[in-house]
Structure formats: C-alpha cells, structure tokens
Image: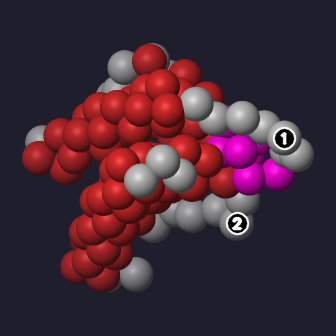
Amino acid sequence: MPDNTREDLAKYRLEMSNEHMKSAKALLDIGSYKDSIGRSYFAMFSAVRALLALEAVDFSKHSGVISYFQKEYIKTSKMDVKYSKSLSQAFQIRNNADYQDFFVVSKKDAEEQFERAEEFVDAVKLLFET
C-alpha cells in the first residue's frame, strides 16, 4: 500500500474517532449512558486503528488491535502506560454495557469514560503531529 493511501486511511480513522466523540457527548447529554460508553470506546479504538493504518497493520478482532497497541506503543513508551489501562477498561465496560443483561451505567460512569476517551484521543493525535 503506498504511503499516501496509508496516510489517507489514518486521517479517515481519526475523523471517525472525532465523530464517535461527538456522538458519545450527544448520547451523554440525552441520558443514553450505555450508548455513550460504547461511542467513547469506539473513539479510542478508531484512534488506535489510525495509528495502525500508518504501519499498514490491522486485525480482525478488537483484542488484536489492543494487544498490538500495547506492544508497540505502551511497552516502547511512545504512549504513557495509563492509556493502556484506559483502553482496556473501555473495551471491558463497552462489552458489559452491550452484552450483559441488567448492566447499569451511571451518568458518572459515562462522564468518566467520555473524559478518558477525550484524553486518549488527544494523546494519539499528538503522535500524528510528531
């Protein structure tokens, strides 16, 4: 894949990340906390996939993307270890919210997840600027 195509894909995925953040905020504002949690997670996930696009790497499962991110960006100190925890927690809570019966998400939970996602996405964007 030529470099410009990888860069275009990375840019597209960052735009998707921004769109997911807007959706997460809108859902939070109307009280759809479970759905807001999901969009916050997908904002983070899309940001990670933007990084992977530059390396022409992708995985069919979320766990593969997360594992690669941890190996290539956390263990190499390109990103702070707190972002590994944020992404892993977001993945888990999103799975619980989507698939676990009677899983309750409070407004506070959704707000905290949104704030972590915002910080995470901003940190990924900084990598694109260097």
Q: Is residue 68 left or right of residue 110?
A: right
Q: Which residue in the rendered view is the most extreme toward the left?
A: 129
Q: Looking at numbered disc 2 in the image, what kind of residue is underneath it?
A: Ser
- The residue indicated by pointer 1 is 102
Secondary structure, mark 2, is loop
* Label 1 Cα neighbours within 10 Å, binned few <14 / some 14-19 / many ≥20: few
Residue 6, given in percent of the width and then of the height, sits at 33, 73
Residue 83, given in percent of the width and then of the height, sits at 44, 26
Secondary structure, mark 1, is loop
Q: Which residues are magenta?
A: 92-99
Instruction: Work out whether residue 128 or residue 21 is closer to the camera in this orientation and state it.
Output: 21
Q: Which residue in the rendered view is the most extreme toward the top?
A: 81
Viewer-nearest of discs 2 and 1: 1
**Would residue 92 be seen by someone viewing this image from the given angle?**
no
Label 2 to label 1, Cα distance in Å?
29 Å
Image quadrant where residue 17 sits = bottom left
- The residue indicated by pointer 2 is 60
* Label 2 Cα neighbours within 10 Å, binned few <14 / some 14-19 / many ≥20: few
Instruction: Work out whether residue 72 or residue 31 is closer to the camera in this orientation and state it.
Output: 31
Q: Is residue 75 above or below residue 44?
A: above
Q: Which residue in the rendered view is the most extreme toward the right?
A: 101
Instruction: Work out whether residue 128 or residue 19 is closer to the camera in this orientation and state it.
Output: 19
Image quadrant where residue 18 sits = bottom left
